[in-house]
Amino acid sequence: MQSKNTQHTLDNPPKQLRAAVSGGSITGLVTALRLAKKGYQVDLYEKRREYNRNIQWGARQSLIDVLSKIDESLAKVFLKTVATEIPRGSREVAEQSSLHKNGVYKNKERPKPKQGNPNAEELSGSEMLKRKTVCAMKAQDFEKFLNNYIVTFNTLKKALASSIKIIPEGDNGLIRIFKEKRPDLTHDKQTDTWQIAGQDPYDLIVIAEGANTDTKHKVGIKTHPASRMLNQIAGMVQRDRHGIMIKHLHTEKDNNTGEEEYLLSGLISADNKPSQSWIVGDVSKEFMHKLAREQNEREKVKLIRNEFKRVASRCMLNSEQNIEDAGFEGAVNTKDIFVLELQAHISNKAVSGKNLVLAGDAVGNGHWSVGGGMQIAAIAHSGRIDALADAIKHGDNLTEALKSYNDGVLEDTEAWLLEGIKDFYIGLPKTVVIDSYKKVLSEFKNNNSTNIPERLKEEVRSELAPDRFFQ
Ligand SMILES: Cc1cc2nc3c(=O)[nH]c(=O)nc-3n(C[C@H](O)[C@H](O)[C@H](O)COP(=O)(O)OP(=O)(O)OC[C@H]3O[C@@H](n4cnc5c(N)ncnc54)[C@H](O)[C@@H]3O)c2cc1C
């Protein structure tokens, strides 16, 4: 690191700062671009050969501001080619719900996305979450778009004209993309820094490997479950809902236990992709019991597809036959529909040693219903990486800069967790769940051995005693 007072001359040029970013989805791509803009030479590692997730992301205006901070033309092209408006707004429907005996049907308008503001203030997670979703996009379209921005020749020319130099793999540019799993991390005890085997030393390593990364364990960071586990089903229906977001709450009887359970499903239909609607929703316990009992693999596939049709038909207010006729595919291209597990998580810290930090879902993750994760990463965490990169560049107090990063990203992620916790416990009154969760998260901050889901259960129980919701 160079000190603040270093005089740079032709014989004593400033040191070329080097960063590695591991994980090339949204967190990694935005981080790599922002670090390059700061003058860092960046190595970006992505183990997937292709971007193939069908997930739809809703996003706030602040995402477009972040893109315009990187390059105003990037934000312009994003608006033209990736983002789609939500002209019919969002809708919340609740039926057969003990919480809403007479049903609920709420419509909210969504503002149109505008050209970004490169001078917009950096937002924390909680500030960002207060803003309204203004557009939607398919995850793989956004990932490919940012990846192409890094590698294409035209953009290279544009980038060279601005202050970022972005050069494709193989050249000595400021972002090198390695389409491979990051090589092993090694730790230098003397300097307390992490390095990547076979590479020159890095001033900063950003782990943007998503919620399931096992790197945290390697660098001494623990992940803690922060909600109960939900089983969900997701996919893309080849049917139009003309640019609308729908959240659908539903209550069902469970034939095994005779208890009621609460289900949630969501839909985003993108306006300029008229033939597709993205669906994701909880599956019932009864369904999971049935699936576990079924031994025949083909029958299992049939069961899963039927359950998807059921969730989709409820959410799209359409018949299962119509969903079947329209056709549908899984959450990942070429894969059929599958059941996924959703559980909130939070890390005990986001920094290891003097040069390694976590960002994005690697820090923690909440419920998708909030539309928070991609934006927590791209807006809030990326702003904090920017500040950390500046501190390293200017030779500021590194311990303070790392502490500020650590506290900041954990706070951002906690804001997402707090916003989404009610949707892990749909059947319980929102305020009780949120108030109890606030208390438990603050306990966790003081004592990382707190079992968050168990403590939440105790807290809510002391208010309501609804054992059945916690099975
Ligand atoms: C069903 C669903 C719906 C969602 N809807 C929304 C929404 O509407 N709005 C929103 O803002 N968010 C939404 N989210 C959340 C959003 O998808 C995540 O928050 C976001 O993908 C996190 O990005 P990330 O880059 O941190 O991690 P990931 O997207 O998980 O990416 C991690 C990347 O790292 C790579 N990687 C992992 N390990 C290595 C390694 N060792 N070496 C190299 N590469 C590696 C992986 O291949 C992957 O590309 C949703 C999530 C789900 C599951």
Image (cartoon, rainbow, N blue to C red):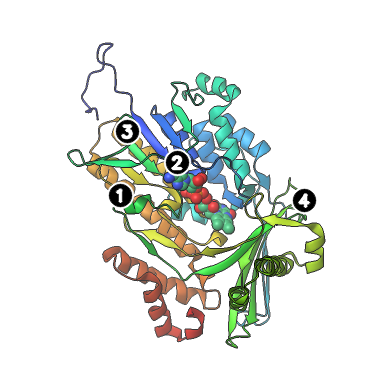
| Circle 2: element type | loop
Q: Neighbour class for label 3 at 10 Å: few (<14), some, many (≥20)?
A: some
Circle 2 sits on which residue? 181
Looking at the picture, tell me which residue is in the foreground, 116 or 371.
371
In the current view of this chain or complex, which residue is farthest to the front? Answer: 296
Which label lies toward us, 4 or 3?
A: 3
User: In 3D space, how far apart are the residues under numbered discs 4 and 2 (Cα atoms)?
Assistant: 35 Å
Q: Amino acid at mark 2?
A: Lys
**Residue linked to disc 1:** 219
Mark number displayed over residue 275: 4
C-alpha span from label 1 to label 3: 16 Å
Instruction: Say which label, 1 or 3, has the lower sequence index.
Output: 3
Q: CA distance from mark 1 to mark 2?
A: 17 Å
Residue 202 tag number: 3
Give the spatial CA distance, label 2 vs label 3. Answer: 17 Å
For badge 3, the amino acid type reads Tyr
Please tell me how crowded label 1 is: few (under 14), some (14-19), or many (20+) other residues with Cα within 10 Å. some
Q: Which three-letter amino acid code belongs to the residue tagged 4?
A: Ser
Lower sequence index among marks 1 and 4 = 1
Residue 278 appears in the figure: no
